[in-house]
Amino acid sequence: MMDAEVIRQRIEESRQLLYQLGKKYGLRHHKVLKQSMELDELLNRYNKAACKKGCSRLSESNDSSLNE
């Protein structure tokens, strides 16, 4: 699994490339659509990792409140 900071950096690079491709080719070009899907995949990975991290924190928080 990639580190969250590495994923964030890749997301930013992917976002910039998507913008450049969109300006060059227009939003319906296959290169733009492919890049958009790659960005979506990176965002999904990042959100999945964040949810796992957040869910474990939430679980710990709920466990501690049950012990009170």
Image: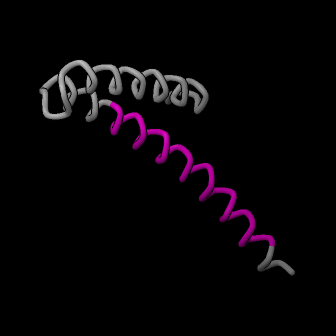
Q: Residue 64's quadrant in the figure?
A: bottom right
Q: Residue 25's quadrant in the figure?
A: top left
- Look at the magenta stretch and give its main secondary structure: helix
Where in the figure is residue 16, as x and y percent of width and height? 42, 23
Q: Residue 41's quadrant in the figure?
A: top left
Please determine whether, in this image, residue 19 is positioned above or below residue 59. above
Where in the figure is residue 36, as x and y percent of width and height? 28, 33
Quadrant containing the C terminus in the rendered view: bottom right
Q: Which coloring applies here? A: one colour
Depth order, front residue of 36/49: 36
Q: Is residue 20 magenta?
A: no
Tag count = 0
Q: Residue furthest right?
A: 68
Residue span colored magenta: 39-64
Q: Residue at x 26, y 35 (%)?
A: 37
Q: Residue at x 36, y 20 (%)?
A: 17
Depth order, front residue of 8/16: 16
Where in the figure is residue 19, as x and y percent of width and height? 35, 26
Question: In the image, is 66 to the left or to the right of 48?
Answer: right
Q: Is residue 52 magenta?
A: yes
